[in-house]
Image (spheres, rainbow, N blue to C red):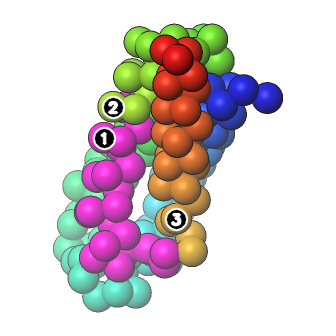
Amino acid sequence: MSAHRLGAIFFALWGLMHVAFGTQMLMLNASGSAKAVIDAFYLDTGLLPTPDQLGSTLDAIFNQHAWNLLWFGLASTVVAVAFNWRNSRGGYWANMVLIAAADLGFIVAVMMPGFIDIWIGIWGPVLWIAGAIFASIGRMQARG
């Protein structure tokens, strides 16, 4: 299999993982389970205020985050399938920028401060880096 297609597969996996997480978060919050998710991932660190302190703002923040995950994931999956699979230069740059923007924010704002266990949070960045490596090799081969 060619490198650019491996890159497309990794980018699509990154996107599908984020669509799934965003959808799951929206469904959890709709069922009133957002507090349990926040408790499990954030409050155990003692670095964030309790949901009672945040009040109704917590639901809005949670939903906005879930919405972003879902659409970042969907957009990157569409680009991977429609453009990266054909080794498109535009698709290459679209997913390089889109996924880097999403995952760098996650790494800096969530992983580095320790809000999430590294073994839980590492999979998105691993898929991003693998996709970037193989898509880049594919782009270099297309020029060569």
At horizontal 55% and vertical 56% (from top left) the residue drawn is 126
Q: Which residue is mark 2?
A: 97
Q: Amino acid at mark 1?
A: Ala
At horizontal 72% and vertical 26% (from top left) the residue drawn is 2
Q: Which residue is mark 3?
A: 122
Q: Give the secondary structure at mark 3.
A: loop
Magenta part, dominant SS: helix
Residue 49, percent from left and from top? 22, 77
Q: Is residue 96 rendered magenta in the image?
A: no
**What residue range appears in magenta?**
98-118
Pick the front one: 65 or 35:
65
Give the numbered dot on residue 70.
none
Residue 75, percent from left and from top? 48, 23
Q: Which residue is mark 1?
A: 101
Pick the front one: 112 or 66:
112
Left or right: residue 103 versus residue 26 is left
Q: How many marks?
A: 3
Q: Give the secondary structure at mark 2.
A: helix
Q: Give the secondary structure at mark 1.
A: helix
Residue 53, percent from left and from top? 20, 74
